[in-house]
Amino acid sequence: MLYYLFSYLERLDFPGAGVFTYVTFRAAMAIILALIISVWFGNAFIKLLKRKKIVETQRDAATDPYNTQKKGVPTMGGVIIITSILIPVLLVSKLHSVYTILMIVTTLILGVIGFADDYIKTFKGKKDGLKPAVKLGGQVLLGLIVGLTLRFSPSVQINENVQLKIENNKEVVIKSPNVKSTRTTIPFVKNHNLNYANLFKWAGPKWMYNLAWIFFVLLTVFIVAAVSNGSNLNDGMDGMASGNSAIIGLTLVVLAYISSNAVTASHFDLMFIPGCEELVVFLAAFVGALIGFLWFNSFPAQIFMGDTGSLTIGGIIAVSAIIMHKELLLPLLCGVFLFEILSDLDVKRFVKQGKKHRIWKKGPLHDHFRTSYSDFKKAWPNSTVTFKGRGEGHNTVHHEVKITIRFWIITILLAAFTLITFKIR
């Protein structure tokens, strides 16, 4: 809204109104506003939840095997994150941008799904919450909306080749025509674009691009479901998911800025995506909201984000990467989420199939580090585990603060590796 107001004032030659044309200024405004709103609104929202007794009822010292005593802590804190994202975005973004619209739709759809799940758990007393099929159906719907919009919207185009040349002592940007493309960025490879259409050359030139777009839409559905569920699994300790997601979000801000600027895109030999600067603004608000939420969610947590937050932040990460054609970087950037999923699947396979050996003591992965080997043997006396620890250390149980900070450190390293892949080819 403010963007359109200041654009009008700029046409009237109002002094200083042109500052809103700079994406860096709008991104800075977004992160500051999101941070302030999350802290201010978060405090009021926590007090409201406590008055209404909308608190964690499932975990206390008697029922939680980790003795964390978190019964009575307000939940549904994802409302704080969503509110703190949307208000700055509505104020400083270009609301007509297809990318802004897609990110708002992503936030609202997954926010509603997560809120419904938290509502059922809190008010209906059903521990399992929303039926998995319903939750997955919502994620599939979002994936289809995103994939089909990127396929058919005329506003979604990329520039595959951008070059800088010096002419008359001036830098001149030479761009190829904007096109719709099934190309995506892959790491560690020179001229690092993969064209999904090349996977379907066997179908002939008439069908290869149609099949590539079908593949892209299905891949979008899979990525949205996988990353949002990975974020959901990562939300098991105070500050865990919010801290990791803030680091990932900050990395995506850098990637979005590079992709939205012809000069930087040329320098890193990446595809230039016109209009992608609105992702910079949205993701800046995303990072600010998460950092502000950490004010209350760090140990000992005053509020939990619940599925309202965890599903939403995972979806935002997935969709923003897909828009930037950086989806194949997600296994590296979101490596913590990936291992949370794999460890959880390992444990579920172990339990359902009655296996005698498993890789992790407990899943998701963060629970593995606060489960001693002796506790594992008490629960499964006839079973073995790959990663049980060494020597006396296999009975060590780490405090959740140590586990959380170590996961943050790992995510920082993965983020750094993700960025340097553009220079290591």
Image (cartoon, helix red, strand yellow):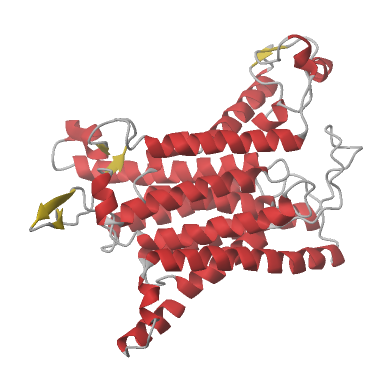
Q: In the rendered image of this protein, does residue 335 appear above or below residue 277?
A: above
Task: Choose between 423 and 217: the one closer to the eye.
Answer: 423
Q: Position of residue 177 (x, y in %)?
A: 14, 56
Which is nearer the eye, 264 or 120? 264
When asked about the image quadrant of residue 276, the answer is bottom left
Q: Residue 310: x percent and y percent?
A: 62, 49
**Residue 320 visible within the image:** no
**Residue sitting nearer the eye, 344 or 127:** 344
The quarter of the picture where the C terminus appears is top left
Question: Can residue 384 be seen from the camera position used here?
Answer: yes
User: What residue lies at 11% left-to-right and 57% top-to-bottom?
Assistant: 169
Judge from the rendering whether residue 54 lies leftward or rightward of residue 387; answer left or right.
right
> Left or right of 93: which side holds 405?
right
User: Is 64 in front, or is 87?
Assistant: 87
Query: Residue 257, how many percent across, how many down?
Result: 37, 55
Which residue is located at x 51 percent, y 34 percent?
413
Quadrant for residue 179, please give it: bottom left
Residue visible at 14% across and 36% down in the picture: 204
Q: Residue furthest left?
A: 168
Q: Give x and y (percent) for residue 406.
A: 65, 33
